[in-house]
Amino acid sequence: MRLILSLSALFLSVILLQLSSGGVGPLDALSGVALGFSTGEIGMLGSAHFVGFFIGCWGAPRLMGRVGHARAFAAFTSLGAIGLMGHMMVVNPYAWAGMRIASGLCVAGCYTVIEGWLMARIENADRGRVTGIYRVADMGASLVAQLLIGVLTPAHYISYNLLAMLCCAALLPLALSRATAPEMPEAPRLRPGLAWACSPLAVVAVIVSALSGATFRMIGPIYGQEVGLVPEQLAWFLALFILGGALTQYPTGWLADKYDRRWVLVGISSLTLVSCLSSALLSVGTVSTLVNAFIFGMITFPVYSVASAHAHDFARSDQRAELSAALLFFYAVGAIAAPYLASQLIVLFGPAAIFAMIALGHAVLLTFGLARMRVRPAPAPGTRTHYIYAPRTSFVIGRLLRGMRERR
């Protein structure tokens, strides 16, 4: 308990940061609609966020090595707050894209600092308990952040200032903490080829995971408005997606530990095809749209973690941190492309086109998964790693989770 209390400042910073960053995506989508931005321009904002996220993941460990944890955290939160407050000062989609890059930098940089701090403070015996609390805090705040959309007025300076205040407030727990900042460990090298060498299927799966998650969270508000949801209902539409994903982490993990993980990915993709068809054809009312969002989250949210576990089955212990960074790199690539591509498809074919795009991605994953089963056998049960929920937060997350993936 003493350890948890000593880390409470970090957990509080995570909650405040997630409340701020988790709300800006859907708020930008609704604000863009209110201000007359084109659907393609709104999609560009979502892609810009992940451009900043990737740059932040790559650059944050190096900045931390130069100026330390606390100064780096202050720099990144300042970038995030500036990006949020600038929205209603310069109402232009391309300027907003630059501000979203700053927001993405803030998210990646702050999570890198927090996870690096956690990694240095916890021992292997406490790793599972502490990271469990960390994930609950992060996902719980993400869920609440979606509900904020129901009370934030689109295209209003007060809405963006409120999110900026939450971003600034994330500074306070760390700034007032008496804990000594740890030494910065060596940043993992970014070796995308390592992920492909360990598991081509995992690489395809994390890209498809980005196709699903980034599209839904960044372009979902446009889809919701097109099918008749009001802002309060849009808030639940996005929150139910996250809630569904949170509730299926344990049962999916049980399946992924018990059976061939390739079959789990194939099964998930098969169910996603059904869910996408249902969302495209049956979302004709509020209840059906919300139910479909919940089911869609249940099915698609665990894909990244299953893919990560499968890739780690073929990695050595000394490769785990770099493998986690490589998988996150491919996720970021998919997340950069997905929102803009989805927005263009909506312009051409209507709102249901985003589910057609996601369905196509999962059809590729299903086919590739079946093909990979013919290439090599599944790892023996005694050599497989533990399934754990793998957050997509920073390149150092692999080091934080090190020791929890020990082979059975």
Image (tube, rainbow, N blue to C red):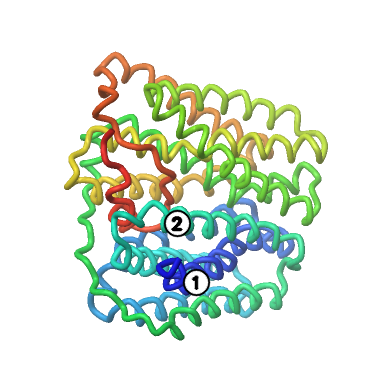
Q: Nearest the camera: 298 or 282?
A: 298
Task: Find numbered disc 2 in the image and state the secondary structure of the residue it sits on.
Answer: helix
Q: Nearer the viewer, mark 1 or mark 2?
A: 1
Q: Nearest the camera: 9 or 145?
A: 9
Residue at image mark 2: 50
Left or right: 319 in relation to 10: left
Residue 343 in picture, x, y percent from top left: 59, 46
Residue located farthest toward the top when viewing the structure as drawn:
374
Residue kind at label 1, given as amino acid type = Ser
Residue at image mark 1: 13
> As displayed, is residue 243 above or below residue 169?
above
* Number of on-image labels: 2
Using the image, tell me which numbered label, if any, was put on residue 344.
none
- At horizontal 21% and vertical 38% (from top left) the residue drawn is 315
Few, some or many residues within 10 Å of mark 1 (<14, 14–19, 20+):
many
Q: Nearest the camera: 158 or 249?
A: 249
Few, some or many residues within 10 Å of mark 2 (<14, 14–19, 20+):
many
Left or right: 314 in relation to 230: left
Cβ atoms at labels 1 and 2 below 8 Å apart:
no
Left or right: 307 in relation to 215: left
> As displayed, is residue 262 above or below residue 73?
above
> As displayed, is residue 76 above or below residue 300?
below
> As displayed, is residue 106 above or below residue 288?
below
Residue 274 in picture, x, y percent from top left: 62, 23
Determine the image quadrant of residue 354.
top right
Task: Find numbered disc 1 in the image and state the secondary structure of the residue it sits on.
Answer: helix
- At horizontal 32% and vertical 46% (from top left) the residue drawn is 404
- At horizontal 22% and vertical 57% (from top left) the residue drawn is 188
Residue 347 in picture, x, y percent from top left: 64, 43
In the rendered structure, which disc, 1 or 2, sits on the residue that comes first in sequence? 1
